[in-house]
Amino acid sequence: MLEGLKRLEYRGYDSAGLAVLQDGGVTNVKSVGRVANLAKLASGKNLTGTTGISHTRWATHGGVTDANAHPHVSSDGQVVLVHNGVIENYVAIKKFLLTKGYTFASETDTEVLANLIAYHLAKEPAAPAPAPGASAPMADASSRFLTAVRKTLLHVEGTYGIAVLSPAHPGELVAARKGSPLILGVGENEHLIASDVSALVSRTQNVVYLKDGELVHVTGSGFTLSTLDLADVSPVIDQVTWSVEDAELGEHPHYMLKEIFEQPQALENAMRGRFSADGSTANFGGLNLTPADFRIIDRFVFTSCGTGWHACLVAEHLIERYARIPVEVDYASEFRYRNAPLDRDALFFVISQSGETIDTLAALREAKRKGYKCMAICNVVGSTIARESDGGIYQHAGPEIGVASTKAFTSQLLIAAMFALYVARMRDMSFSEGVEFVKGLKQVPDLAARTLKLAPQIEDIAKRYSKFNDFLFLGRLDLFPIALEGALKLKEISYIHAEGYPAAEMKHGPIALISEECPSVFLVPKGELFNKVVSSMQEIKARKGLIIAIAPESVELPEGLADETLRIPDCHDAVLPILATIPVQLLSYHIALARGCDVDKPRNLAKSVTVE
């Protein structure tokens, strides 16, 4: 369990705990802070049981305290539970349980679940003994414990991924999901349950992805799947395609740096097998739409959260420029509540690295509810979004552990460029234009590797600029989303105030922030907007602002205009956002490191946001 928690720590690291059934009772150990703190406490205990649950927490209800750490035990001691998600009606349930004599030791919504299961377990009659000579009833049919969990969940509003034990039922473990991911690992003489495959791959690569409303009942003899309404479910066992070594740090000090340097390979994987034999367009086998279907689409709607939303903005620019189809981009967290009028022949795309982001999943479900086809760009095979979409494109970027997304983001940008080409060739892009586009895309892995050679120069710049507490990131058109992404990365891992703006918007307000204490990072394009961006840089310089310029090699900047210049390789226009992203990732990483920040586990953040 400790090994699994260490691999899940990127999902939450406010506190950690574990509970083991042994000697007719429960040994519960938990601690504020990282899993290492829990490991020290657990080493002093004689933990000899064969059944246990564990948890690493990202706080939602209640502060970061030992009392609020999971696992939670019901006040009668009969139920032990860990939980990801949010119980929205916990206040009403808590009031009811207080009238029944149950007490509470924490501020969490999770403890309410533990006590409600205990309440139903106490009410559940014991199974009758089999008649002489008759065979014993099936475990599921006679499990008071499973029935109590099922009855409890019928009263719950909100989201959950839970695992539950009871000292009165030592041969059983029950887990269930609604909105929060849950995976069963089928090992050799063991079964494991986790919220992410990374916690299981060191033990088994055979997994069952639970769907919403499903429960798994694990006993010493195996497991069964069923639904809340008592329907049996035949398990589908999938194979995880990557190994535990893929999620190891290797020679790198941090996952973020490892994943930055994995980008050439991740980009290669995103392209593999996805170009036509004549080299004039991209191919996507998982979209489940014909060219004729694409001909009648009159608008794309892209939705995501955080870094994925920035990828959507780049997709908007690329698709509108090359395919000449209108694109609307929305925050997934806002889409479901806006009730916006939509074109009849719109096609939806959601972008999610994990495939479990709750806001993005809710947006997908809302679009499907309204009758729209929904595609997904996703990195995790078997994830909820991948399963519920009508088709999509897997990124094949490999496991991404660092909280700040890097290789998954550039992979999304490449897929966006490939999709823009794919649709453009169905519309009015010529064969020769398509061939040139494909040539440009095929160069991306090598160009990314060349860009990574800027790392020593960027580290030197970062050390000198780490003292500043405010930054501006500025770009135009498809480089504006990269400015937003650069600002987000700096905020996420170094806690520096940073803002991303279209460069031309500077003079409409943000220029008031310019001083010698507020550096500006400019993403410099080629072509017709070059002179416009240079003018914005000169406005900054006239006010004594410091400038870091990220520019293609062939661009000639006026001498002395930029205080620091990072040269990225010349490339196809559709590739420039990908290459421009790499320096801002490295800049954020090295600034955070210089300021003593934990780049892989930034404060208040978790990798996968599975609660609204």
Image: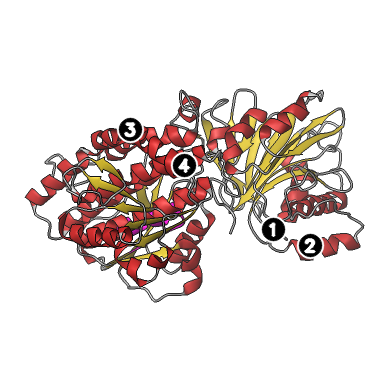
Residue 228: x and y in percent read: 66, 53
Residue 311: x and y in percent read: 36, 53
Q: CA distance from mark 2 to mark 3?
A: 50 Å
Work out which quarter of the rendered image holds the N terminus and state it. Answer: top right
Q: CA distance from mark 3 to mark 4?
A: 25 Å
Res 67 label: none
Picture residue at 15% right of the left edge, 56% below the top: 527
Q: Identify the residue at the far bottom of this view.
A: 341
Residue 331: x and y in percent read: 45, 63
User: Which mark is nearer the camera, 2 or 3?
Assistant: 3
SS for callout 3: helix
User: Which mark is nearer the camera, 3 or 1?
Assistant: 3
Q: Identify the residue at the far right of this view.
A: 101
SS for callout 4: helix
Residues 49 and 293: in front is: 49
Query: Circle 4 sits on which residue?
Result: 591
Q: CA distance from mark 1 to mark 2?
A: 10 Å
Q: CA distance from mark 1 to mark 4?
A: 38 Å
Above or below: residue 207 compared with residue 146: above
